[in-house]
Image (cartoon, rainbow, N blue to C red):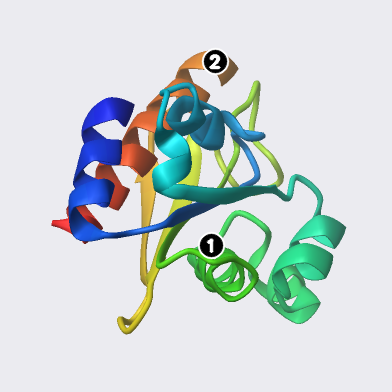
Amino acid sequence: MTPPELIALARKKGAMISTAESCTGGLIAGAITDIAGSSDVFDRGFVTYSNAAKTEMLEVDPDAITAFGAVSEEVARAMAVGALKHSDATITVSVSGVAGPGASGQKPEGRVCFGIAKSGADPHVETVEFGPLGRDVVRQKTVAKALHLLAEALS
């Protein structure tokens, strides 16, 4: 799903999108807002690269970060739910992963956890193992997957 296609779908569904990003540092929000007219469907992006930012901006429980790690489905879920709570969005996507180079503790390079939160629905989470493809490629694939998950949830 390309950003223009996602914007058209969100517009058709009357949806408002927000993002909560760690490993992508705002690239998902950037991909959406690169498109003229995106303000019709994009509310805001949270770049929560540090654990403190996840806790302060999105109300991610620090105990969850300690227990599961920042790169976990539990934290991705909390990020997506927090973004929904702290925005005017009707749907949010979150990402937290290890872009590389190299692993982070016991989390391998290329592991990215995704969360989708949508008004009136249970959050969806999933983990993708992109593998050690290098930082730029992992981040690009993460953006593409996030756009796909948003479109899937809106369909």
Residue 133 vertical position relative to residue 88 in the rendered view, above or below: above
Q: Residue at x 65, y 26 (%)?
A: 102
**Can residue 20 be seen by looking at this rendering?**
no
Residue type at mark 1? Ala
Residue type at mark 2? Asp
Q: Of residues 138 and 119, which is closer to you in this image?
A: 119
CA gap, disc 1 and disc 2: 21 Å
Which SS class for mark 2? helix
Q: Which circle marks residue 136 in the picture?
A: 2
Q: Of residues 51 and 67, which is closer to you in this image?
A: 51
**Can residue 12 be seen by looking at this rendering?**
yes
- Tell me the quarter of the image containing the C terminus: bottom left
Q: Residue at x 72, y 68 (%)?
A: 65
Q: Position of residue 116 (x, y in %)?
A: 39, 62
Label 1 crowding class (10 Å Cα cut-off): few <14, some 14-19, many 20+?
many
Q: Exactly how many numbered labels are in the figure? A: 2
Q: Is residue 131 left or right of residue 153?
A: right
Please give the residue where the numbered disc 1 appears in the rendered image: 76
Q: Of residues 86 and 76, which is closer to you in this image?
A: 86
Residue 111 vertical position relative to residue 89 in the rendered view, above or below: above
* Sequence-wise first label, 1 or 2: 1
Q: Is residue 140 left or right of residue 1?
A: right
